[in-house]
Image (cartoon, coloured by chain):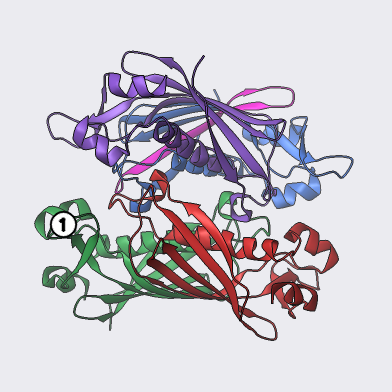
Chain colours: A green, B red, C blue, D purple
């Protein structure tokens, strides 16, 4: 079974919109933090270190699919349960379940890559093969 | 053919992350603005007015699916082409194509609802049937 | 001596800009959360409750003055030490010292008001006299 | 008289908080964009170019002082009038007046530096003397 890491978020007043519920782009802000924390908790060094050792500058998104189940508001504490649902050749599926106590709030499946600088030095990024050292830490 | 409205975004320094590319939650910030501008351009009044006339307080997300094709960075100008791809009973699919000149940057399909306050006065929201007056303006 | 409450922040990748340091508007995001947490920790109810009991809908800023001493980056944990430095008739000075371990990162003095809806029902807000019940909880 | 450049902002739904007014950290987001646009309009190249030619990686804040005069909400269009009020040896004062038509909304004076990487290669930044080539473009 895939390793799962939990990241906790306090919803703040400024995270909410005039409808008094979380403005949805903030969920992606938290999910991005949960993604990075997953790797940190698994023992992967921060990206500014992996840039030097593995050429990995981060894990940008290729595709994301999210379902919003219930609303949240300020004062809520959310738990983001994160795992890697699938490892592919040059990408992986990172899965998030966001809950408030027993309530499911949001679910998200992302396809991400391990990105490096382009080999020709031009601006932009390219997908690297999954670094085995990172995968071994995360399973 | 569905009506299409274009919303223009300037990418700023602070929209970019240490990898020097747009931090992806900002795309959802812009897409949410493009969603609202679509309705404004179609002649739908702002939500604080429709709250009084139609009980509509906004169009929260139920589901979103986005593909990231190319990266963008500060100095770029992005065009977000927005349309309603499908009208359903109590929801609709809003479609976004984000481009920089001829380059496709990102695509997104959202399921949104027209939300109203709950009838029992409790916190939270509920999905309203598509208001015909709004649909007529948007087709 | 004024009561002090500490709010803790994890700096995330997406909080940082292409210079790899915290993009400064994020400090104000955290300070605003620290402001609210100060009142919560002191026992003041959330604003949606005080709106009903005291007419207070929040504590918007009138004036803010911040000094940035050292930079911070992702992976850092910041402590925000918050107090009310001065109570005035219709405003108060809220003071923040942001630190990373022994390092001072940022200092900020804000003038805030307790805001209520306008009496004539028009849009916009007005400053209320400091509610004695709130002040008593915070000293 | 100092050169003034105007940057225009559309206030969006998601920029507003449950009190239905602009959540104040967003003003600093816009002001930071206005700061960069000031230099761009004056003919200064983007920071990723000045990093190579002048060692300047950006203009981080040292000190900011803002007054909030009137509230703004979504649907508003704001004009940010930007100038350099004072040039110092290793810093400068950038001044912003934010207005909505004839209404003053917010004023801000910032002390910023031209930042470069540290000479010893360590993380962090240092203040550079004002580059005369940049100052000449901005006066």
Label 1 Cα neighbours within 10 Å, binned few <14 / some 14-19 / many ≥20: some
On whether residue A131 falls in the magenta region, the answer is no
Residue C10: image x %, image y %? 37, 49
Which image quarter holds the C terminus of chain D?
A: top left
Residue D2: image x %, image y %? 49, 17
Q: Nearer the viewer, residue A85 or D39?
A: D39
Which residue corresponds to mark 1? Answer: A50
Residue C97: image x %, image y %? 44, 30
Q: Chain of mark 1?
A: A
Residue D71 falls in image quadrant: top right
On whether residue C86 falls in the magenta region, the answer is yes
Res. A24 in view: no
Span highlighted in magenta in the image: C74-94
Q: Is residue B106 left or right of residue C131?
A: left
Does C139 sit above or below residue D25? above
**Residue at 57% across, 49% down:** A14
């Amino acid at each position: 079974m895939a390793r799962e890491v939990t990241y906790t978020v306090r919803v703040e007043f400024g995270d909410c919109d005039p409808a008094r519920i979380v403005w949805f782009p903030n969920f992606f802000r938290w999910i991005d933090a949960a993604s990075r924390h997953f790797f940190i908790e698994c023992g992967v060094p921060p990206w500014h270190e992996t840039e030097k050792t593995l050429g990995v500058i981060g894990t940008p998104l290729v595709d994301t699919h999210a379902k919003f189940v219930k609303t949240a508001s300020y004062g809520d504490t959310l738990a983001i349960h994160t795992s890697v649902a699938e490892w592919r050749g040059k990408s992986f599926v990172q899965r998030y379940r966001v809950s408030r106590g027993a309530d499911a709030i949001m679910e998200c499946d992302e396809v991400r890559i391990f990105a490096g600088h382009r080999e020709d030095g031009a601006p932009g990024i390219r997908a690297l093969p999954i670094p085995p050292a990172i995968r071994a830490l995360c399973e």
